[in-house]
Amino acid sequence: MRDEILTIKELASLLKLAEKTVYAMANADEIPAFKVRGQWRVKRIDIERWIEQQVARRSKS
């Protein structure tokens, strides 16, 4: 499902990071996240693009 919306918990599991780390990244605008009534959410397609960008950026270094 391409327009799936993930919670911070689901995203943390996907990225294999602690939830606190993902919250901090969202608050710092380091990941493409948005709030719905005070709760962070992430579109799966946006995070997939972000991951690809991170990989590409790393490959150029």
Image (cartoon, grey):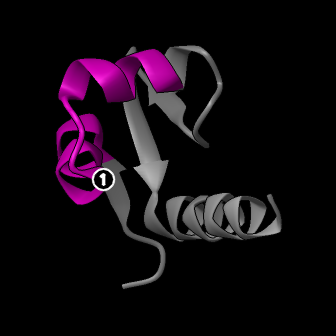
Q: Residue at x 52, y 69 (%)?
A: 48
Q: Is residue 27 above or below residue 8?
A: above
- Quadrant in which the N terminus appears: bottom left
**Which quarter of the figure has residue 52?**
bottom right
Q: In the image, is residue 15 part of the stretch drawn in magenta? A: yes
Give the mark count.
1
Q: Would residue 51 appear left or right of 7 to someone viewing this image? A: right
Report which residue position mark 1 lands on.
15
Residue 3 lies, in percent from the top left, at 47, 73
In this rendering, position of residue 9 left or right of residue 36: left
57, 37: nearer the viewer = 57
User: At 46% across and 82% down in the image, what residue appears?
Assistant: 2
- 31 sits left or right of 12 in the view: right
Q: Main secondary structure of the magenta part?
A: helix
Q: Position of residue 16 (x, y in %)?
A: 21, 49
Task: Find the magenta span and give its range.
Answer: 7-25
Figure quadrant of the C terminus? bottom right
> Which amino acid is tagged 1?
Leu
**Is residue 52 or residue 39 the one in the foreground?**
52
- What residue sits 30% from the left and 53% below the top? 15
Q: Position of residue 34 (x, y in %)?
A: 55, 33
Q: Where is residue 7 drawn, in percent x and y?
A: 27, 43
**Which residue is at 82% across, 66% downward?**
60
